[in-house]
Image (cartoon, rainbow, N blue to C red):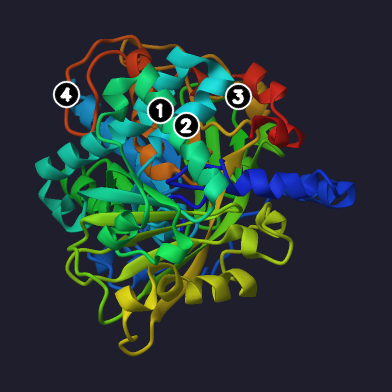
Amino acid sequence: MMGPILSSIHRVYVDLSAVISELSHTKRSFDSLLARLSVVAPPVPNPSKSYWQEDPPFPNLVGVQSPDLPRTADIVIIGSGISGASVAYTILNQSQKRGIYPGIVVLEARNLCSGATGRNGGHIKCSPYMEYARLKARFGMEHAKKLLNFQRRHLAVILDLVQQNEDLKISEVREVQTVDSFTDEHIWNEAKKMVQELREDAPDIAEDIVVHDGTEACEEFQIDPQYCYGIITYAAGALSPYRFVTGLYASLLSTYSATFSIETNTPATDIQVNPGNPKRPFTVHTPRGKITATHVVHATDAFAASLLPGLKGKIFPVRGHMTAQEPGNLFPKLGGARSWSFIHRRGFDYISQRPGTGELMAGGGVVQSPEKGMDEFGIWRDDRSSYAIRAYLDGLLPTIFGAHNWGADMGARVKMAWTGCMGFTADLLPYVGVLDQKITLRKIPIARSSKDAKQPAEWISAGFQGEGMVLAWLSGVAVGLMLVGEEDEVFEMAPGIPGGKIADWLPEEFVCSKRRVDCSNASDLATLL
């Protein structure tokens, strides 16, 4: 669900616009929503199970714990999804090059990778023409290009990392041809204008985008023509995010077993400061005991505000829905080489097909809920689902592809359905970097520093608006590099890590400054869309 629930295709461009337009007519509903977005809660203990988690490649890691919780750590990372994995990977690898082996503990409230990463749609995809149009309108041409290239860089970086690491070969990472099919004539005409704008401003980015008009395109891509005004295709990626992240953790535990541990079913319930310990000023409380640490990294996406008072109402959950479905007997066997997005006047849906087994991973439908999507904002319960969205997704695929392309169901079509919480920020951009003490509301003493140590601090990599597969990995890399003191260094490209300075590729708009947080407000969402 989540990889993009608001998603691969124009993160928040259609779904959120539709939702907010409804809210503008109903002040009471909007006020209720704003109140809900300011509520904080921990992850529920028994979430719905995602299809990705059905057959874990590393079953011994699902509930991995040390016999005894470590009492000290150089770095505590809260959250075991792709962002936390990226931070850990970067710190461990970059530190090893200098002969340093920091003690790192990853805390996870539930089973390993049980949050948004383990629940999403598996798309490594942004819609470049829609993203560019939206970003250019907000930030101008040059900033829009950098923001877009940050997203587009993820596929190559992740592919390179997988090729270099045997444990990651199981993650189904691949390039795909992605198909954006438009069910509404007005939206289709607007999309074609966006493609033209991108071709004029950034022809290198637009070079693989193909616009297909007419019913012939529907036949070529096997989509029911009565629901298709046109199609746009381009290159993207897909993966099993759960397999990717758990494979990476298996590799890190094998390589750094003496200094790296993962503690699942160990929620961080509080963070306090001990002024008498300037080297390790943070005490992280869990039901299994306390850990004193030099640094704390918040990689909990939708749940970040539960431990960061200054982000209350600034980062919040949106619940998304996903399904795994068995294709009909006439559906083409494409070996996982294609993904789809169906863009409607209200909302959109996204689909990928797994290589080998061929299941269709289908999600979306947020505006089908009883309150047209509004009732999915500020919802923490990934142990429940919306009956309306679930029913919509259950019937989507045979309808949108058409009976002549789908054929007959081969047994039960829907194999599993689940939900998950995506982290949204009030200004619709990720929070990345060191946290101001006025955001954490925890004042820490100044410690003596060495050339190999950053001052103790709290850090964040969160708020990916359901687009984590094209935002989270490099955001985590940036935090890891900052934390080990390489923020201003020029470094060579390594597996999973771009070359150059961080500032060369990390958009400045992502930096989680106090001023940015203060200036953003959930009530302003409508003006951003």
Residue 306 sits in which quadrant? top right
What residue does disc 3 label?
275
Residue 318: image location, x then y, percent: 61, 52
Position of 18 compared to 182: left or right?
Answer: right
Amino acid type of the residue that numbered disc 1 sits on in the rendered structure = Gln
N-term mark: 2 or 4: 4
Residue drawn 59% across the image and 49% down it: 15
* Separation of marks 3 and 4 at Cα, in angstroms: 32 Å
Q: Dot 1 lies on which element?
A: helix
Along the polypeptide, which appears first: circle 3 or circle 4? 4
Cα gap from disc 4 to disc 1, whole angstroms: 46 Å
- Name the amino acid, label 3: Pro
- Nearer the observer: mark 4 or 1; the answer is 1
| Type of the residue with mark 4 | Lys
Task: Give the number of the mark in front: 3 or 1.
Answer: 1
Across and down, in percent, residue 182 comes to: 46, 52
Gap in angstroms between the C-alphas marked 3 and 1 = 58 Å
Mark 1 lies on residue:
196
Label 2 and label 4: CA atoms lie apart by 48 Å
Residue at numbered disc 4: 97
Q: Earlier in the sequence, mark 2 or mark 3?
A: 2
Q: Of marks 3 and 1, which one's residue comes earlier in the chain?
A: 1
- Which is more foreground, mark 2 or mark 4? 2
Mark number displayed over residue 193: 2
